Image (tube, rainbow, N blue to C red):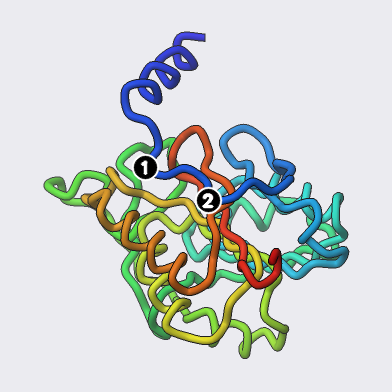
Amino acid sequence: MFNTVKRLVRLALKPPLHRPDIRLPYDLYGEGYCYWPLLREITPDHALVYSFGIGEDISFDLAAIAAFDCRIHAFDPTPRSRTWIDLQPLPDKFSYHPIGIAAIDGLAEFFAPARADHVSFSRAPDRPAVPSESITAEVMRLQTLIGHLGTRVPDVLKMDVEGFEYEVVEDIVDGDIMPVQLLVEFHHGMYGIAEQRTYQAVEELRAAGYALYFVAPSGREYGFVRRDRIE
């Protein structure tokens, strides 16, 4: 109860950076803090979903499979996630890949979380002034991953990638691969990332033809949809 009150006070004092551009009917899928929106009238049956940054929670992915019979390709190259996923009973519609997403094809450095009970490795240390353990893992651009897996462009792309999202957004808007729904957790205020980076990313997506239809109360999880699919 105390933590809930703290969150409400924090949100009242510092509201989200953005409000949705449009109103569209959606439902939320997932549990706890790992929930994401999917549009009721846009998400097709048997949708193809690329889900980046699963950590130790695939409740969104399993809920999407149950609701839409989705085909899920889930990605997370970090050690704790790989160990956890190996122990899970996974449905046939779910495939896991120990690869990260970035704006390059190759290797990237991932920094361990400051707290031992946290799972997410990140683009930069939690506390930039404090030395942090890091690992090197394979990353690919979105277009490379699509070719690597031999799939079509995903209907839904979800990213909770701890700071890598900004370069990936730039790579997407500079290219010609445009998922219909784009779900992104922005990490302004963390890892030394300024709010301006999120303002810039949202404007880039708007200019590329996306509309913002969802902003979570936390002010971090955003849902975008291509305007040419709703107009």
Residue at mark 2: 21
Q: Residue at 57% of width from left, 58% of height from top? A: 224
Seen from this angle, which residue lies furthest left?
129
Say which amino acid is labelled 1: Leu
Within the image, what quadrant is residue 220 found in?
Answer: top left
Pinpoint residue 194: horizontal percent, then vertical percent: 23, 51
Single out the residue that lies furthest toward the front. 231
Residue at mark 1: 17
Q: Secondary structure at mark 2?
A: loop
Numbered badge on residue 74:
none
With 78 as the anchor, is 71 left or right in this view? right
Residue at 53% from the left image edge and 79% from the top image edge: 142
The C terminus, quarter of image: bottom right
In the rendered structure, the answer to whether residue 92 lies left or right of residue 101 reads: right
Q: Position of residue 27 (x, y in %)?
A: 74, 42
Please rate how many residues cluster around mark 2, counting C-alpha atoms within 10 Å: few if below 14, some from 14 to 19, many from 20.
some
Could you say which is closer to the camera, residue 80 or residue 184?
184
- Amino acid beneath label 2: Asp
Towards the viewer: 109 or 33: 33
Residue drawn at x 47%, y 77% as measured from the top left: 172
